[in-house]
Amino acid sequence: MADGEATRGTQSCPIQFDHESVEHARNWPEEFRELREQCPRAWTESYGGFWVATRFADILAIAQRPESFSAHKHYDPATGETRGGLTIPPVPGIRGIPNETDSPEWDGLRGFINRRFAPRAVEERRARASRFAAALIDEVIETGRMDIVENLTNPLPAILTMDVFGFPLDEWRDFADPFHKMVYTRVDDPDIHKVVGGLDRFYQRVDEEVARRRLEPKDDILGYMANGTIDGEPLDGETVRQLAFNILAGGVDTTTALTSNTLIWLSSHPKQRQRLIDDPKLLPIACEEFIRFYSPIHALA
């Protein structure tokens, strides 16, 4: 946004916006609707001040101009100093890459990881996902009732993530529980460093399995990272941990949040649920809309 626009926006559209607040969690649809209608590009003083864009066209324009912003995250483990990145305020600790990088670093990392998460590669996992889902439902079907989160949307994405990594499937809760806690803990909570440290076990296991795969390669994501190269150079241990962190984030937390909200909405809108059952061609559009409406993380920078 040009300086003139920024000045006018600050004068005409200052808001009190805190996406980490209880009030936002309770009223986010109304809050965003109000912003889109009355103040689509607004300035808030929360967390040192930042712009809030709420309309599709503006967000698309920003995303297509990487030269106008930086997503790079700096973290000094010795001092705990954290700057930049995708979260406001910054979460202390490891970078999630490639998301928290800028070009040209981003280009090499994105090209590397895309080969394992391209549509065809993901489609090949559909049958395994269906079997895992059926097994989880079989565990509770005789009782006649289930908890959507505890029995399905928490374990299923986590088990699939273990499968992608090549970890034993029964380790899923060791990684999912600490990550959920990190996401729901406010960044200004005095215990946030301790909470983030709860993922140390995950990094330890990544290091262990990568070392094994360098000796005995396997066709899983850890084997791919252990023996792959970017621009002809092997990945160092820190890059592997940062990539693994980001895959874990998408696998065990955001997917759980999205699918939980989606299934709860469908359970309370039986006509719309039946419409999707009767016309499966609508499912791709419905998936896009659920991702848009139930975005698991608000206010990414």
Image (tube, grey):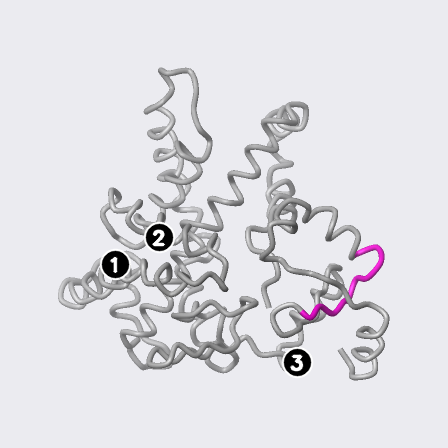
The residue that mark 2 highlights is 178
Residue type, numbered disc 2: Pro
Residue type, numbered disc 3: Ser
Left or right for 34, reference 299: right
x then y, percent, for residue 74: 45, 79
x then y, percent, for residue 167: 25, 51
x then y, percent, for residue 166: 26, 53
**Residue found at x 46% / y 44%:** 256
Above/below status of 132 relative to 166: above
Q: Earlier in the sequence, mark 3 or mark 2?
A: 3
Tell me whether the residue at label 3 lies in contact with that at label 2, contact meaning CB atoms closer than 8 angstroms: no
The quarter holding residue 210 reads: bottom left
The residue that mark 1 highlights is 201
- Secondary structure at badge 3 equals helix
Left or right for 8, reference 228: right
Nearest-to-viewer mark from 1 and 3: 1
Residue type, numbered disc 1: Arg
Q: Nearer the viewer, residue 68 or 109?
A: 68
Left or right for 71, reference 239: right
**Residue found at x 65% / y 51%:** 24
Q: Nearer the viewer, residue 156 or 78?
A: 78
- Secondary structure at badge 2 equals helix
Tell me whether the residue at label 2 lies in contact with that at label 1, contact meaning CB atoms closer than 8 angstroms: yes
Q: Earlier in the sequence, mark 2 or mark 1?
A: 2
The residue that mark 3 highlights is 68
Q: Is residue 184 magenta?
A: no
Q: Residues within 10 Å of mark 2 (few under 14, many from 20)?
A: some
The quarter holding residue 9 reads: bottom right
Spatial separation of the CA atoms under disc 2 and disc 1: 9 Å
Give the residues drawn in magenta, as a range.
36-45
